[in-house]
Image (tube, rainbow, N blue to C red):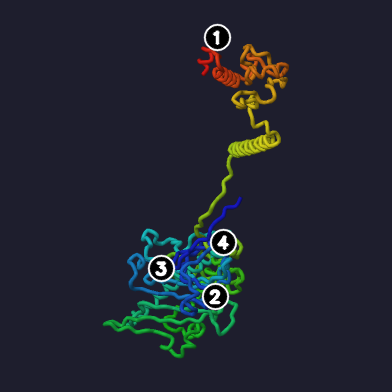
Amino acid sequence: VQPKCSAADISVGSKLFTNQTALTYTLTDVWRPSTGGAGGAGTSDGITPTLSYNDNILENCTVNFIDIDISSADRTATQYAYTQYGAVVHTYATCSVVSPNGTLNVNLTQEYDYVPPGVSFANMYQFLGTGFLSRNKTERSSLYWGESIMSMYWANTTNAMQRIRANQTGDGNSGISKGILYFNPNDNEQIDNITLPSFFNVDYRFLVDEGQGNITVIRPETYGSHKDFTSVSHLLENQTYPNIWESADILAKAAYSTVLTDLGYVNSTTNMLLHEDYVRNFTSNFSEIKRNIENAYPGPSERSYAAERSGPLGTTPSVFATRYVCSVPQRKPAGSIFVSVLVADLVMLHAVWFLFTSAIDLFALRSKSGAYHCQGCSKQPVMMNGGYREVAGGYRDVTGVSAPESKAPDDQVELGGLRPARQRGRDSDASHHRSMSEQRLLNPTSSLIARIGRRASDLHRPGALAHLGWTRATEILVLL
């Protein structure tokens, strides 16, 4: 028996992670693709504040762009102890969620900072493991190497900024205090090889504090045309200041591939983490980078892919890990089931038996009209011309045999019936009248009524008391 779960409503702004348990995302937009994209590209009717989600597979995931926010100022002293510069990597992705109610698109933002503001000074000179929920180099080898490449080139990029500032200020020039690099896939060329420098274009801004409130902004137009100085290949050829392009480019590519792997996009030909040659290429200089970093030690692997054994590369379809309200059927113990079935059967049998007996009784009453009367009730006294007579038919005992009536013990009143004594001559030979004793035994109530009736009739006759005698008259009065 499978549990039944209702869909979960995930609000915009919620923190999410997938069943791969690697990165954490923020849900930033939900909209229907038929009305256009989010963020002003579509109508307001298509944007919804919540995502109704019921374990739907994430489909058609793409990474739209990556930005790297580099900063030296406004960082905590603990962060500064790890490295003088920090880098916060934001990856912006879009996925489709297909449900019975239709298709919804979701925008997800992933943030990675190897030395976040809440880092402890006690973890100095060790692998921090920040940004990833878990790691397994055997079953999730691609994510294992994605984390290793991201942390290694995060440390390399921030250390490069520190060296550049030291050289710049050593010559009496002002150093860069903050900067932003914006990487987006090259739309002008269809490039499947992610190792090429032309895979991304990069836009950027760097702030140079000249002192006394003067800020100099470095942008592509500072050096020439926007098209030329947003090409990573052109920036590398000219070693444009600040020359961190190669390290930052690989950091962006690592974030790009790690997010696609975590979102379960299995068909990407540009994902470095699904191809051994790409992973081998980007990890080949790990040992050299490790010698040129500050106090932020990367990991989990510090060796190249060729030097360390791990599981096969790859990924599986992903779903969001969230809470559902479910009804889980529970099987009762065998004893409880037996008692419940037994009680139900007994109740059913009782109901069937009641209906059966009621039907039989109703049928019997309708087929035999005499069944409505009790035994002995069919012979009741009836007033006829001021006298009493009994209804035709005699009493029958329980065996069904007619009980003959005996001769009345009184000369004037026939005690075995309800007729006056004057009619006795006509029916003297009727053998079906019962005696007084038989009536008392078989039907005492009817016998008592008959006696009262006969005594009352005799009292109305002239000279009845004298004829019956005082004793007989007293008996009649007592009965009355």
Disc ID at residue 33? 2
Q: Amino acid at mark 2?
A: Pro
- In the rendered image, residue 44, in percent from the top left (x then y), is placed at 47, 76
Q: The residue tagged with tag 1: helix, strand or loop?
A: loop
- Kind of residue at badge 1: Gly
Q: Nearer the viewer, mark 2 or mark 4?
A: 2
Q: Secondary structure at mark 4?
A: loop
Secondary element under disc 2, as helix, strand or loop, is helix
Q: Which residue is mark 1?
A: 469
Q: Residues within 10 Å of mark 2 (few under 14, many from 20)?
A: some
User: Which residue has dot 4 on it?
Assistant: 140
Q: Which is more N-terminal, label 3 or label 4? A: 4
471 vs 200: above or below: above
Spatial CA distance of label 3 from label 2 is: 46 Å
Marks 3 and 2 close (CB-CB < 8 Å): no
Residue 10 horizontal/vertical position (percent)? 48, 64
